[in-house]
Image: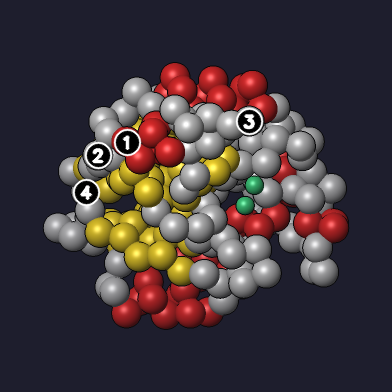
Amino acid sequence: MKYKVYNVLLDFGTNTYLVWDENSQQAMIIDPAATDKMLIEEIKNLKLDLKYIINTHGHGDHIGGNELIKTNFDVPLCIHSLDADMLLNTEKNLSSYFEESVISPKADILFEDNEIIKLGKNKVKIIHTPGHSIGGICLLVEGLLFSGDTLFSESVGRTDLPGGDFNTLVKSIHEKLFSLPDETIVLPGHGPSTTIGKEKRDNPFVGLAEKY
Ligand SMILES: [Zn+2]
Ligand SMILES: [Zn+2]
């Protein structure tokens, strides 16, 4: 698998990922954060066969580019069922607090835990990791974990927003993410990449270096 990361929503530093199988060129875009035509150009320049738009969760800083991508490529928009209503509601997706509020098209595919989608011959596994939001997911494909706002390098997602719960987040990370191989590369919704092994050791919220 190949991937590229983009930062199109500078105020929030949200990571948008394009992920693709280099044999078939089948691709997914994870969390198109803002309306930026550069994303359209990239998909075209890389000659990708875009198959899915996927939101790791429903917060406004992860969904602002959904409409732009959907209008240009007409591919299904996917999110966990429990976060689906956030797409359509500026209070629920918290964008009513932003400078510009965000409304997304409605979801076409509602994920549940352990669901599998395919890019070429590669299986992408949907892992439901509630705690930052009730319908937050991580995506696992070929040793890459796209962790949304669940797990960051030496940090975790906020749990003080509606739908957030710290104990639930810790349980999600310990049971569903720390059970993955240590060498799994973690690509978060904000900030730099890390690995499962490093976070097990150094993460001050959920690792052996726990302080909180
Ligand atoms: Zn979030
Ligand atoms: Zn975020």
Location of mark 4 (residue): 120
Confirm or deny contact between disc 4 and disc 1 (CB under 8 A): no
Residue position marked by numbered label 2 in the rendering: 183
Instruction: Give the spatial CA distance, label 4 vs label 1.
Output: 28 Å
- Alpha carbon of mark 2 to alpha carbon of mark 1: how far? 6 Å
Dot in front, 4 or 2: 2
Which residue sits at x=44%, y=19%? 175
From the image, state whether disc 3 or disc 4 is nearer to you.
Answer: 3
Q: Position of residue 144 (x, y in %)?
A: 30, 45
Q: Earlier in the sequence, mark 4 or mark 2?
A: 4
Q: Position of residue 196 (x, y in %)?
A: 35, 37
First in sequence, mark 2 or 3: give its number. Answer: 2
Inter-mark Cα distance, 3 to 1: 19 Å
Q: Residues within 10 Å of mark 1 (few under 14, many from 20)?
A: some
Look at the numbered disc 4 and give the secondary structure of its residue.
loop
Q: Residue at x 38, y 61 (%)?
A: 18
Disc 1, SS: helix
- Tell me if 126 is positioned left or right of 164 in this view: left
